[in-house]
Image (spheres, grey):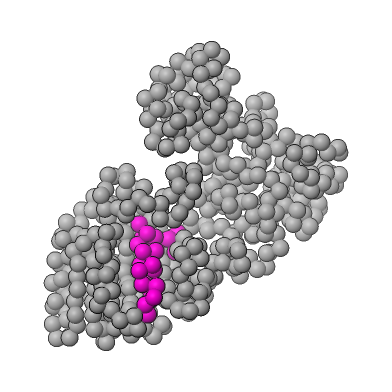
Amino acid sequence: MIGNRTSETVKEYGDYQTPDYFVDKICLYLRKELNLDPDIIFEPTFGLGSFIIGCLKAFKNIKKIFGVEINKTYFNICKKRIDETVIKRDIEVHLFNDDIFVFDFDNIKSHLDKNENLLIVGNPPWITNSELSLIGSINMPLKDNFKGLNGLDAITGKSNFDIAEYILLQLLSEFKYYNCTIAMLCKNIVAKNIVRDLRKFNFKLSDIRFLGFDAGDVFGISCEAGLLIMRFGEKGKSVCDVYDFYNPFEKKRMFGWIGDNFISDIGNYMQIINIDGKCQFEWRQGIKHDCSKVMELSTRQPDGTYLNGMGNRVDVEDGYIYPLIKSSDLKNVVITATRKSIIVPQKKIKEETDSIKQNAPKLWRYLEENSGLLDGRKSSIYKNSPRFSIFGVGDYAFKPFKVAISGFNKKSVFALVYNKQGKPIMLDDTCYYLGFDDFKISLIAMLILNSKIVQEFIKSIAFLDSKRPYTKEILMRIDFLKVVKVVTFNELVTLAKELGVDYRFTKEDFRYFIQYLSTPSENNTKIKR
């Protein structure tokens, strides 16, 4: 270990020091391919100073160096390395042993001319704010909802972000009026989020590119990552060109904004843009309870009891127990059996739960016995809600037929989910689904979603390297009315055979489906076949 770089330090600070050989390759690319010749170098969170030293070797006209680093040991090591490197060169060096999250950037900007060629380069922490919270770190940005999220989005997960993303947005904001290039290592998801939010923050960039590399080779971690390069200019570019770091001369794809749509693969998308629109159905997220040890049970045992997540036998009434499917179960295109059950104490959000005491006294006793876990759920959505509340529940959750997809799987498999025994199958909150009352409607919807054109469309708009590639926002862009104009009945029959779906449907069923699509949702149950 160098200095005090323990495993806890790595975890808390997202501390993956960049190898010198890799820094040299980055600097060579910046000099040769981008023709950069910076006057000023700034490395935020500089660690051992690898990028500062690499820039000093690669660029000959550097006049000033700036750096910020919170770790005192790293700061001292880096200062010594720089002093030994610049001893024969007339270069101003300004290093700050400070926290980047509260650092006053006027300490740097007061030394700059806006026309000087500034290169901000480095490797910000590879950790999220939620991960830092879990380990009780104080090395965190202020919790000010910097993305401006509203309502539940701000408190149920979308407010989680990578620390690198926060730092990059901070740098873009501070230096947007300077002759500046930013070249930073980061995870793919950070690059995607930065490009997605460019319009929100009104940054004008003349060049955006991302060079992917194998983080396993460089840092020994399993992670999709690359070098994000952004140059300020007047063009206001909102599309990022993607290259392979090891073959940076051939563009792999482009992602970014086309009109009002954010696209992961613009080249592929332009060939199937005709099905982009608004879904005629409402995609729903599964049940959120945040207490699987208590709320999720096994299927019913031969003696009529269940097993909970702690391995304890549970003897409760069946009225509030439903079969459950989780993301990992959504592998086949037809699912009629489950390996788990779930307690569903409400039929709609905020519904009172006191009636369980009379309707199912054994279940109420079980919930009270585990109230320490249930009442201790951290998410603020449970505050001021009835006791033992869940979310993601409503009339839609009790539909007998569902077409569902895992939010986490890389492959977009849509499954027809229903219970031959009667009770509707529930899904957990890592899944998204459409609910139907009609079997044939749900069957045809599933086949359409698994059709080649829809699969290609999803690939072009979803970011498969995200933790959750498929979201409601992505799925709501699948316009069924547009799809049925290009997908024929015969193609769906052929697809059903390829998928091994042993259900028959007719041209009349398909016509009925199209009519169903064209009818407002409150009236479609009245359509006659």
Q: Is residue 39 magenta?
A: no
Give the side of residue 521 with respect to residue 198, left or right. right
- Residue at the spot 72% in from the left edge and 46% down from the top edge: 445
Can you tell which quarter of the image residue 26 is in?
bottom left
- Residue at the spot 37% in from the left edge and 25% down from the top edge: 372
Q: Nearer the viewer, residue 329 or 138?
A: 138
Can you tell which quarter of the image residue 162 is in?
bottom left
Q: Residue 432: x and y, percent?
A: 58, 43
Q: Is residue 165 magenta?
A: yes
Which span of residues is magenta-colored? 163-192
- Residue at the spot 20% in from the left edge and 53% down from the top edge: 6
- Residue at the spot 28% in from the left edge and 74% down from the top edge: 109
Give the side of residue 171 with respect to residue 321, left or right. left
Compared with residue 23, is residue 383 higher up or lower down, i.e. above or below?
above
Q: Quadrant of the N terminus?
A: bottom left
Q: Residue 299: x and y, percent?
A: 54, 25
Can residue 503 be seen from the camera position used here?
no
Give the side of residue 113 with respect to residue 310, left or right. left
